[in-house]
Image (cartoon, grey):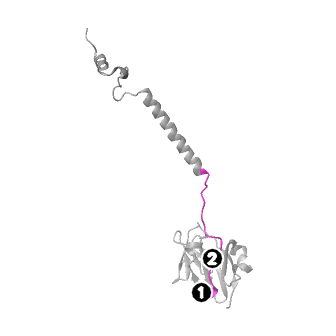
Amino acid sequence: MTESNEEKDQEKLPQSDVAPLVRSPLRGEPTRRGVLLAAWGAFTAGTLAMLGTWGRFMFPNVLYEPPQQFKAGFPNEYAVDAVDTRYKASHGVWIVRESTGFYVLSTVCTHLGCTPNWLSAEEKFKCPCHGSGFVKTGVNVEGPAPRPLERYKISLAPDGQLLIDKNTKFQEEKGQWAMADAYLPYLG
């Protein structure tokens, strides 16, 4: 009778280290242990992903907008009969100085909310989206815009600077442009 290779291997080992030899499965054949490890790995990854989304949920999205009320410098910094565009990008306003005072226009077109451009050569605001045109006072004169631009509240702060408050809007079609805070008389 011939001895199997297993028995020969066991004879070569010292007696204290004798253990039954376990044959490894063929490559590509899943083992019970491998399947269990993969399942636990997938469960752990899914749990961590879920905990990550819950953690992110605890910190809501915050939109950092510029303040709705801001100081816009001293009145003598503005040229007479000119539209100042320095706050167009940062605060969404144009400050217009006339010989008798100031008013502040919104940079939002009343048609579809685009941002018009001030064309100083033509002395008007022109919306690039649909062609609405507004004169320097904000009144619509061309294009599909249904009403004039809105004005914001303007006053003098205690330190003498222009104080713009975008929380208060004035609409011409409601007769609000004639209200005291829609226009700042200034002869200084």
Which residue corresponds to the image point at 28% horizontal and 15% vertical from the top-left? 4
| Secondary structure beneath label 2 | strand
In the displayed structure, 64 sits above or below 152; it is above
Three-letter code for the amino acid on which mark 1 is drawn: Glu
Which residue corresponds to the image point at 51% horizontal and 71% vertical from the top-left? 128
Task: Compare residues 18 and 112 and report the one nearer the observer.
Answer: 18
Q: From this viewpoint, which residue is outermost toward the right? A: 180
Task: Compare residues 17 and 147 and report the one nearer the observer.
Answer: 17
Measured as percent of width and height from the top left, residue 174 is found at 72, 73
Which residue corresponds to the image point at 68% horizontal and 88% vertical from the top-left? 186
Residue 70 lies in the magenta-colored region: yes
Q: CA distance from mark 2 to mark 1?
A: 18 Å
For the record, the magenta segment spans 57-77
Measured as percent of width and height from the top left, residue 83 is found at 58, 82
Task: Quarter of the image for the C terminus: give it.
Answer: bottom right
The reply to whether callout 2 and callout 1 are in contact (CB within 8 Å) is: no
Q: From this viewpoint, which residue is outermost toward the bottom? A: 188
Residue 49 lies in the magenta-colored region: no
Three-letter code for the amino acid on which mark 2 is drawn: Leu
| Secondary structure beneath label 1 | helix
Give the quarter of the image for residue 167: bottom right
Question: Tag count in the figure?
Answer: 2
Measured as percent of width and height from the top left, residue 98 is found at 63, 87
* Number of the label disc, if any, that sits on residue 105: 2
Measured as percent of width and height from the top left, residue 156 is found at 69, 82
Task: Quarter of the image for the N terminus: give it.
Answer: top left
Q: From this viewpoint, which residue is outermost toward the top? A: 1
Circle 1 residue? 77
Q: Main secondary structure of the magenta part?
A: loop
The first of marks 2 and 1 along the sequence is 1
In the displayed structure, 137 sits above or below 57; it is below
